[in-house]
Amino acid sequence: MSEATAEVLEVSVEALADSRSSAIIDRHILAAMGVGLVPIPLVDVLGIGAVQLNMIRRLAATHGVEYSEKRARSIIISLFGGALPVFGALPFASLAQAIPVIGWSLALSSTVILAGASTYAVGKIMERHFENGGGMDDLDVKSARERFTDLVEQGKEAAKTLRNKASGK
């Protein structure tokens, strides 16, 4: 195989991995938003975490990285802990769903969008880390936390866009 052919093949493989990663993240954003609709307090929060763990597992597999659920849980907890002002409201929004009619409708929109936005942020952090040759054990969580809040803001827009596409708007 010529050097030029090898280069083209390498670029094609990288483009395929990028495309697969984006599709994985998008599917998991929608799944997290669906879980955010669950009207049972705190079940939605646990479900969103499960969706994010699955997303990290799938991203790791796509990039040939050995997956560790224990490490993935630790990463998610660390990222959310660093963004407590942003996500401190998520458990309260979840609990507010217990208030008949008004609680569920008020909490619904914030929980659904935060579920999608946080999943986007976790996915983008892990995607970038894996693309740069990182593994499950060497993520610089401090640096990732700094990007997390900005990515959540981007994720809010991505979640709204995906929601509109899924509903045919």
Image: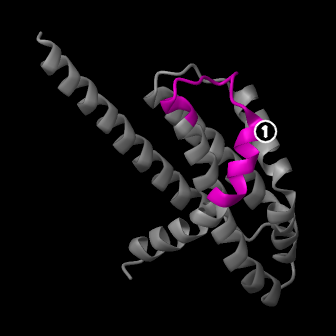
Question: For mark 1, what is the residue?
Answer: 142
In the image, residue 71 lies at what x, y percent?
73, 27
- What segment carries the magenta color? 129-151
Q: Could you tell me which residue is drawn at 38 percent across and 82 percent down?
A: 169
Query: What's the amino acid at mark 1?
Result: Lys
Write the residue at 81% across / 62% down. Answer: 87
Q: Position of residue 65 (x, y in %)?
A: 53, 22
Residue 11's x, y, as percent?
Answer: 26, 30
Classified by dominant secondary structure, the portion drawn in magenta counts as helix
Let me know if residue 34 appears in the view. Answer: no
The colour scheme applied to this rendered structure is one colour
Dot 1: few (<14), some (14–19), or many (≥20) neighbours within 10 Å? few
Magenta span includes 114? no
Q: Residue furthest bottom?
A: 102
- Outermost residue toward the front in this view: 4
The number of callouts visible is 1
Residue drawn at the location 47% of the way across and 21% of the way down: 64
> Residue at 62% across / 53% down in the picture?
121
Q: Quadrant of residue 91?
A: bottom right
- Seen in the picture, residue 80 relative to 38 is either above or below; the reply is above
For residue 106, side relative to residue 68 (left or right): right
Residue 139 visible here: yes
- Between 111 and 95, the residue placed more toward the observer is 111
Q: Is residue 34 above or below residue 28?
A: below
Task: Note whether 6 is above or below 166 in the view shown.
Answer: above
- Secondary element under disc 1, as helix, strand or loop, is helix
Q: Could you tell me residue 1's position as x and y percent?
A: 12, 9
For the residue pair 104 and 136, the one nearer the viewer reads as 136
Question: Residue 78 falls in which quadrant of the image?
Answer: top right
